[in-house]
Amino acid sequence: MTSGAQTSGCFLCTKPGENKDDENLILYRSATAFVLLNLYPYNSGHLLIAPFQHIGDFAALPRAVAADLITLAQRCTGILEETYHPDGFNLGMNLGAAAGAGEPEHLHMHLVPRWQGDTNFMPIVGETKVLPETLQQTYERLQPLFHITA
């Protein structure tokens, strides 16, 4: 779907429309896109950056929206560097269900802070991920930084 119409079953359409940013862990809104915490993070600070427009076709994404996504990714990277001091980042999109997109009709970027040695036996053997802070703690730590660096 590339019409841009919001879809009620799409969490990337529903969450910003509720105007409950604290509850929905939305950290920041620009004119065309928003940043929120991933509910199932790989690491603390795992962010999603998505357009408000309900679109899954990256090639059809308006240039201004694409530019805004990249600008937000740069800003988020700076905030995460300042806050968490990671050794690196994974930044990318899963486009389409075959690529692993959880919401294939609404594209979004993942920004994941990474540290040397952050992969261990727990996800493999224990089938679980251990995070040093809760999502609410991450939100409270990051949210103010989006407003002082605007």
Image (cartoon, grey):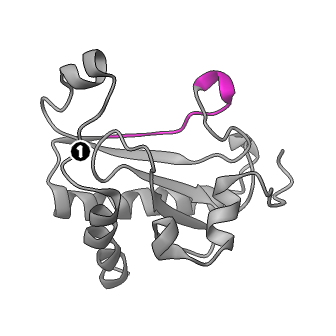
> x and y percent of residue 118 in the render?
18, 32
Helix or strand or loop: what does disc 1 sit on? Answer: loop
Nearer the observer, 12 or 1 = 12
Q: Is residue 83 left or right of residue 77?
A: left
**Crowdedness of circle 1 by 10 Å Cα count: few (<14), some, many (20+)?**
few
Q: Is residue 52 among what the camera can see?
A: no
Identify the residue shown where x is 51% and y is 47%: 109
- The image position of residue 97, as x and y in percent, is 67, 27
Report the side of 112 relative to 114 (left or right). Answer: right
In terms of depth relative to the viewer, which is nearer, 53 or 133? Answer: 133
Q: Nearer the viewer, residue 16 or 96?
A: 16
**Residue at x 23%, y 38% (from the top left corner):** 130
Query: Is residue 24 among the parts visible in the rendering?
Result: yes
Q: Position of residue 128 (x, y in %)?
A: 31, 29
* Residue at x 72%, y 57% (from the top left corner): 62
Q: Is residue 53 left or right of residue 49?
A: right
- The quarter of the displayed image where residue 14 is located: bottom right
Tell me, yes or no, whether the highlighted magenta stretch contains residue 98: yes
Which residue in the structure is indicated by mark 1? 131
Whole-percent x, y for residue 68 in the image = 55, 63
In the rendered image, the quadrant that contains the C terminus is: bottom left
Tell me which segment is drawn in magenta.
90-99
Q: Magenta segment: does it hold 100?
A: no
